[in-house]
Image (cartoon, rainbow, N blue to C red):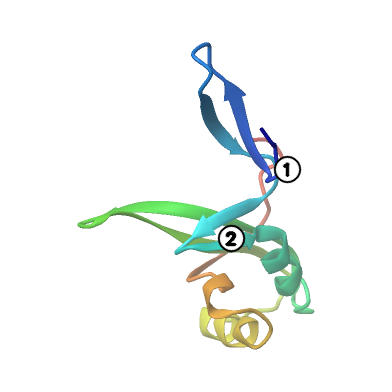
Amino acid sequence: DRLYRTGDLVRWLPDGDLEYIGRNDFQVKIRGYRIELGEIENAMLQFPEIQQTVVLAKERETSDGSSKYLVGYYILEEGVSITDTYLIDELGKVLPDYMVPISFVQMDSFPLTV
């Protein structure tokens, strides 16, 4: 009869079981690794060309079921351009392979509402 603070959100069901609702932080689990999306965002913000960034975990259906992957969205300084290959190579120097997004999307601005 012990509870641990794990970051998981659950609720008690009337029959006494627990129902998993989600996480109360920005960690995601991909290929068995717990990843804090904010760490990737902070690494991307170290590029002087990048003004803002958001990293999201996406899911796609495959023949084997579904798989999760990371996508990095970013806004560049005006008049600057960078390539996905450059981002992948440079992030690979400061992050483990499993934390480097496989896809990047350059945005003009981020939506301010969900």
Which of the two discs, 1 and 2, labels the residue nearer the N terminus?
Answer: 1
Q: Please identify the quadrant where the C terminus is shown.
A: top right
- Image position of 20 (left or right of 27): left
Q: Check disc 1 and report the residue beneath it.
A: 5
Q: Quadrant of residue 5?
A: top right
Q: Residue furthest left?
A: 63
Question: In the picture shown, does residue 82 fall above or below 114?
Answer: below
Give the class, few, some or many, for how many residues have Cα within 10 Å of label 2's Cα (few <14, many ≥20).
few
| Percent of width and height locating residue 53 | 70, 62
* Residue 104 seen by the camera: yes
The residue wearing badge 2 is 34
* Helix, strand or loop status at disc 1: loop
Tell me what residue is drawn at x 48 percent, y 63 percent: 32
Please give the name of the residue rendered at 53% of the width and 33% of the height, measured from the top-left corner.
20
CB of mark 1 within 8 Å of CB of mark 2? no
Give the side of residue 17 with respect to residue 47, left or right: left
The residue shown at (56%, 74%) is 100
Name the residue nearer the viewer: 72 or 49.
Answer: 72
- Alpha carbon distance from label 1 to label 2: 15 Å
Which disc number belongs to residue 76? none
